[in-house]
Image (spheres, grey):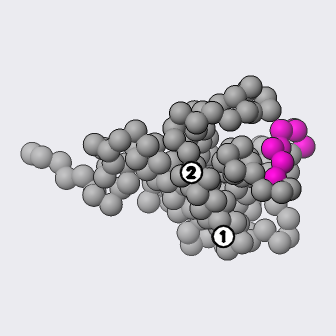
Amino acid sequence: MEQTIDPTLGPVLARTGDERAVLESFLDFHRAVLLRKLRGLSDADAGRRLVPSATTLAGLVKHLTLVERNWFPTLLAPEPGDVYLTSEEDAVASFTLGEQDTIVGLTEAYERACARSRAAAASFDLDHVVPHPQLGEVSLRWILVHMIEETARHAGHADILRELTDGDSGAF
């Protein structure tokens, strides 16, 4: 019996695409999975600590917003005031929620960061190399693969946290 593949999945649609289409579709898929984990939750549920670390569903979105800014626009197309953040304090702060951090606000900030990342990446080919303050230099291809890994890993964390919150699990 032939299995039907859901044609709405970006990575499935890009299965015969070029390298860039495949990389970008996988990254966008995991970005969307992360945001799906917040659907239907209250701000209190999204900010609730369920594991010993400070990791929360809302905190994961806040963290990945910083990660998007760090890896795409700050490296590829910096604007005045963009600074690549590398300290342990920056890492901790990226997960730390304030009273102003709501699901709506965090989602909008993440979507803006992702849009800015897409725009920055679109200006360069995959072989484009930029200086990196810790690694020496990196290519856009490397940045995309790294961001797929980072986003997918945190989407997995979000899936576990959502399951602990209300039993909901899965990519959708």
Please tell me whether mark 2 sits on a helix, a strand or a loop: loop
Q: Are marks 2 and 1 in contact (CB under 8 Å)?
A: no
Residue 53: x and y, percent?
78, 43
Q: Assess whether residue 132 is covered by the magenta stretch.
A: no
- Badge 1 crowding class, 10 Å Cα cut-off, few under 14, some 14 to 19, many 20 or more, is few
Which is more toward the observer, 14 or 153? Answer: 14
As drawn, 123 above or below 108: above
Residue 108 is tagged as: 1
Tell me which residue sits at (67%, 74%) in the image: 104
Judge from the rendering whether residue 45 lies leftward or rightward of residue 20; answer left or right.
right
| Residue 50 seen | no
Q: Position of residue 36 (x, y in %)?
A: 53, 62
Q: Is residue 4 above or below residue 52?
A: below
Kindly identify the amino acid type of the residue bearing the numbered disc 2.
Ser
User: Which quadrant is the C terminus positioned in?
Assistant: bottom left
Out of 39 and 111, give the one closest to the viewer: 111
User: Taking 40 as reference, is 116 above or below it?
Assistant: above
Residue count near mark 2 (Cα–Cα under 10 Å), binned few <14, some 14–19, many ≥20? few
The image quadrant of residue 135 is top right
Give the residues drawn in magenta, as a range: 82-89
Residue 56 position, x and y percent, is: 71, 54
Q: Which residue is drawn at 35% across and 41% down?
A: 18
In the image as oriented, which residue stretches furthest toward the left?
Answer: 1
Task: Kindly identify which residue carries mark 2.
Answer: 123
Going by the image, does 30 lie left or right of 64? Answer: left
Please give left or right for residue 80 compared with residue 77 in the image.
right
Label 2 vs label 1, nearer the camera: 2
